[in-house]
Image (tube, helix red, strand yellow):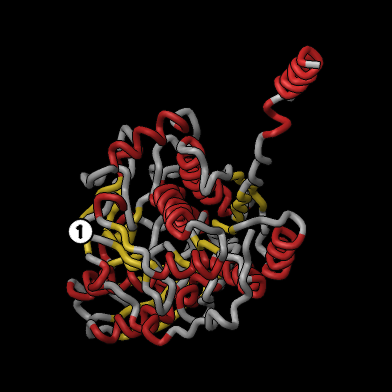
């Protein structure tokens, strides 16, 4: 009998030891799917690629540390195009069918507005990495949207003050692109012109496709103005300034609300006047050299072999989202929103000269801006950009954001991917 018992025990132990470990392991947690949305064709193609690279660097960095909440981050990319209705449809598809967790990206402000409105209806957090219409933090703001780019109102406060202080007649002509970013930027500029003693003597509306810059420049020349306030974006900047005579830039103050690296670097011989940026690869700020080195190790063989502020901004925006999820300990949108609303970032982490913070009223990141200029024809084109001055965030805050009205959290659907 004793031998029989020992035999039964031996068989049981053998059976237990033969069960493979995988059969008893806990099921693997599903990944957190992050959708990057940006128009990858047309005049913003390079901007979209630069933005995606920044998000990609952040995703890979967190995955190398084990992901988030024990889950892998998976990045998917979609091109929403340049039609706002089609873009809204892409957002619906990503949320309903792809079952994304979060949406990041946007270069064109009109597309960002359309997609973020859909995200709000579903309670999905939308991180606007790099579209800079002032309206993104006012009329088109949402509880689920957080805007991480500096906007044209931030840049133009400093640029217009600088130009008008050196102007004799203080007469200003506005050159405005006929899209959400251009119209919103020009409207935000008018109070700053008046506050600095300037007078708007005309506004020229440039079509979004800008087929004939020469015709636009003839209209500019017809106005007797000391200052030309340019709100033209993407490849249109290259088209425009390729036809502006250098002597014209010496006689008039031309200021551009924002110029991205992707508008400069591919056309190193094209002159640029004063413009705004939020970061440059050659800033002597903590972390900048290390970030540039990481970027160049990975993308140094590509057309954009140096990073601009689009890439840097997307990287930091994605990191802010992932840090908020980690601190929240959940992907519950209501809890993550609360974390993002109290987001603060010291200067050393932002590679800037001052701390940045998320405005809980407008959901717009208040951060440093810089006045820059471009020296065409340098032997190494990357060295063409020169930073002239820094302005801390409290000096360029857009006043209208104080009156932004977001949906209440109670009226915002809870989304837990």
- The secondary element bearing badge 1 is classed as strand
Against 108, is 176 above or below?
A: below
Judging depth in this view, the residue of 170 and 369 nearest the camera is: 369
Camera-nearest residue between 96 and 174: 96
Left or right relative to 290: residue 208:
right
The reply, left or right, for residue 340 in relation to residue 392 is: right
| Rendering coords of residue 35 (x, y %) | 62, 53
State the image coordinates of residue 30 (x, y, percent, origin top left). Answer: 66, 46
Label 1: few (<14), some (14–19) or many (≥20) C-alpha neighbours in 10 Å: few
Q: Find disc 1 in the rendering and name its residue.
A: 389
Compare residues 48 and 379 and report the one nearer the observer.
48
User: Quadrant where the N terminus lies?
Assistant: top right
Task: Compare residues 387 and 327 and report the one nearer the observer.
Answer: 327
Q: Is residue 255 above or below residue 376?
A: below
State left or right for residue 120 relative to residue 267: right
Q: Position of residue 278 (x, y in %)?
A: 33, 57
Look at 41% across and 43% down and name the residue there. Answer: 265
- The residue depicted at 28 percent of the width and 67 percent of the height is 253
Q: Residue at x 39, y 38 (%)?
A: 306
Image quadrant where one finds the C terminus: bottom right
Residue 297 visible (yes or no):
yes
Q: Quadrant of residue 211?
A: bottom right
Q: Does the image show residue 218?
A: no
**Residue furthest top as drawn:** 3
- Image coordinates of residue 184 in percent, x first then y, are 47, 77
Occupied quadrant, residue 179: bottom right
């Amino acid at each position: 009998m004793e031998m029989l018992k020992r035999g039964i025990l031996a068989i049981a132990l053998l059976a237990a030891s033969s069960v493979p470990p995988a059969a008893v392991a806990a099921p693997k947690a599903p990944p957190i799917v992050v959708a990057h949305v940006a128009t990858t064709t047309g005049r913003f193609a390079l901007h979209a690629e630069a933005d995606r690279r920044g998000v990609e660097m952040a995703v890979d960095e967190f995955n190398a540390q084990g992901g988030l909440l024990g889950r892998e981050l998976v990045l998917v990319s979609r091109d929403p195009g340049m039609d706002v209705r089609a873009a809204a449809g892409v957002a619906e598809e990503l949320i309903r069918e792809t079952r994304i967790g979060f949406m990041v990206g946007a270069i064109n402000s009109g597309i960002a507005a359309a997609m973020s409105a859909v995200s709000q209806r579903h309670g999905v957090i939308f991180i606007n990495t790099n579209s800079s219409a002032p309206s993104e933090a006012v009329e088109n703001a949402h509880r689920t949207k957080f805007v991480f780019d500096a906007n044209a109102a931030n840049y133009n406060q400093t640029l217009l003050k600088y130009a008008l202080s050196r102007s004799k007649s203080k007469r200003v002509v506005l050159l405005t692109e006929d899209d959400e970013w251009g119209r919103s930027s020009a409207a935000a500029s008018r109070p700053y012109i008046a506050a600095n003693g300037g007078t708007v003597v005309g506004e020229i509306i440039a079509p979004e496709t800008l087929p004939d810059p020469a015709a636009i420049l003839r209209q500019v020349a017809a106005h007797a103005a000391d200052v030309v306030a340019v709100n033209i974006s993407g490849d249109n900047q290259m088209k425009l300034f390729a036809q502006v005579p250098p002597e014209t830039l010496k006689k008039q103050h031309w200021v551009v609300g924002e110029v991205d690296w992707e508008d400069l670097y591919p056309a190193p011989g094209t002159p640029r006047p004063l413009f705004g940026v939020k970061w440059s690869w050659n800033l002597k700020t903590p972390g900048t050299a290390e970030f540039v080195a990481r970027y160049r190790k990975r993308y140094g063989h590509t057309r954009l072999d140096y990073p601009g502020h689009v890439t840097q901004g997307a990287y930091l925006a994605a990191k802010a989202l992932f840090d908020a999820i980690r601190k929240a300990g959940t992907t519950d949108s209501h809890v993550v929103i609360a974390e993002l609303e109290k987001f603060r970032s010291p200067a050393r982490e932002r590679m800037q000269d001052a701390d940045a913070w998320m405005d809980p009223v407008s959901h717009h990141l208040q951060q440093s801006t810089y006045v820059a200029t471009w020296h065409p024809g340098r032997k190494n084109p990357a060295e063409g950009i020169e930073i002239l001055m820094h302005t801390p965030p409290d000096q360029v805050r857009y006043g209208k954001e104080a009156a932004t009205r977001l949906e209440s959290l109670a009226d915002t659907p809870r989304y837990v991917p």
